[in-house]
Amino acid sequence: MTFTVVALLIAVAALGVPLFVVLGAGSLYAAHSSGLDPAVLVAEMMRLASSPNLMAIPLFTLAGVALSRGGAPERLLQVFNAGFGWMPGGLAIVALTACAFFTAFSGASGVTILALGGLLYPILLGENYSKNFSLGLLTSSGSLGLLFPPSLVILLYGIVAGVSIEQLFMAGLVPGLLLLAMLAVYSAVVSRHIGISPRPFSLPVLFSALRTSMWDLLLPVGIVVGLFGGYVTATEAASCSAAYALLLETVIHRRLGSISQFYEIFRETIVLVGSVLIILGIALGFTNLLIDAQIPMKILESLEQGVSSQLQFLLLLNLFLLVVGCMMDIFSATIVVVPLILPLAQRFGVDPVHLGIVFLANLEIGYLTPPVGINLFLASQRFKEPMLNLFRASLPFLLIMLIWLVLVTYLPYLSLWWK
Amino acid sequence: MTDQAELYRRNRTWKAKLEFYLTNAESIVATAGLVLLLVLSLAEIGARNFFHTAIPGADILDRYLVLWVSFLGAVLAVRERHIKIDAVAVWFPEAWRRMLERPIYVFSSVVCGFLFWAALRFWWEEWAHAAAAEKWVAALAVIIPLSFFLLTAQFAIRFIIGPRSSKRAL
């Protein structure tokens, strides 16, 4: 019976029923079959109100939406272009850094591809980068920066797994930079192969670009210094960022002014946050029922028969998460999958902070893989190209990311050097 | 026909009007909640650092405001976009997907209805047993049953209205 219900739920999910409804139906069935009052689900949902870090999610989202509506993508592009455009593969490196920077703020909701991809694509083609390389670069750049503060998925992982958010941000820095460096080297090699000559460096241009975007660049610097220096908590950093971003776009850049613009920004934030947090609310009840039914314990038992070492476990975890990443978006996967794998990882001695980085690295790759790699969808919408072409164009980048995943998974030192 | 006029024409039916006003009201309350959350959290930082004091009750209010903002956001997302794992449906032709919309809405409405009923009973118990000083916190938690009621209603209205024209943005 349970098997039939699970199969049915998977089927309705695949047909396009919202995920929170699917989880809600599953929880109602699970509560009913274990003879519990469905009110227990609501009791679990109320736990959202006792999570002190949850507040950071709407406020960081607000900051990201305000920046993106206020023209931060264009300004960032200008300054990175002036700063890195002279290197071999310069423009490609500009694209990578600007996208990573922006994704960290916009929280991997796909805004990067829509906002920056559209700007960068014609410029890349204009500099004679091949169509395939440009498309692959922009499609895969859409999820770079997931590991940098103040990335929303890191916040969400911290909340779901009960791990310190400051520690997670610290752990994400080196793996995030490593991926950027690997992709930058690849881009430099390709551009040399195509024969693109680097542009001359101009100090006045850099200064003028810095003057325009100085205030945008100060925000992440402030967050990093504030968080790692222990001056502010994650929630304080979030409310300051939101206020700063709104002030910046209103007073300094004067891109926002009317009440209706503010209303739009707040509304967009609310819908983004609402669509994620309702899944979290329902999943709290759902995973609790799964734990009551000892599902993670049963998985662990069957795992222990075949898996004996941490290495084997991590390998299996990578394969499993790559499949999850192909099917689910990163927010839902974090909410639903983390509570299930956390006890398993602890059993095999994997540090929960390291697990977080491995988890997100896997899902970052999932953004690029069919059938529901969200970057492929967005890029296909934005660049008017079929998804399969984009997938093919992203393959070299995907390969580099897989190598990176192996490094991040099997060298915990990269994430935990500061411990 | 301009967009506004087109919108007006479509909003003439009572169902569309109901959805339009309901959505507006939800969106105004949620926006006010988010503004209050931002202002309150900044005031707290100020109070803590400059006056070495805490605003009484602000911490709890913050946490409930997050719930108000997110649950009303989830209701608004019915009209805009909810996260889906439509791994199969994305490969369907447009016409098939439109055909699927009504059954999806009715299923969602029913599930949300059950959750509403559970949430209402839970909330009522909490409210009835809350100490006098805690009544306001229990009252703030009404957002859970309220938003499941609104979700049930919104999905039901969408079921009645049926698939929207792909040309329509709002």
Image: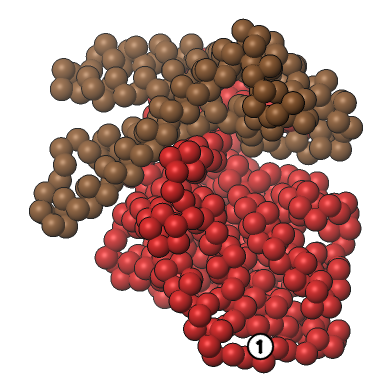
Task: Give the residue drawn at x 59%, y 90%.
Answer: A202
Q: Nearer the viewer, residue A295 or B157?
A: B157
Q: Nearer the viewer, residue A28 or A51?
A: A51
Q: Say left or right for A129 vs A53.
A: right
Residue A254, located in which quarter of the rendered image? bottom left
Q: Is residue B167 above or below residue A343?
A: above
Q: Residue B148's x, y, as percent?
A: 50, 19
Residue A203, located in which quarter of the rendered image? bottom right
Q: Can residue A115 be seen in this view?
A: yes
Q: Say left or right for A253 vs A408.
A: left
Task: Give the residue drawn at x 70%, y 29%.
Answer: B2
Element marked by disc 1: loop
Quarter placement of the C terminus of chain A: bottom left
Give amino acid for label 1: Trp
Q: Spot the red chain and give its letter.
A: A
Q: Colour of chain B?
A: brown
Q: Residue A250's x, y, as percent?
A: 41, 54
Q: Residue B112's x, y, as percent?
A: 57, 18
Quarter placement of the N terminus of chain A: top right
Q: Name the residue under label 1.
A: A86
Q: In this view, does A417 lie above or below A236?
A: below
Question: Seen from this angle, which residue lies furthest top?
Answer: B14
Q: Nearer the viewer, residue B17 or A399?
A: B17
Q: Residue A398's x, y, as percent?
A: 77, 66
In which chain is the residue bearing label 1?
A
Q: Is residue B33 above or below residue A192?
A: above
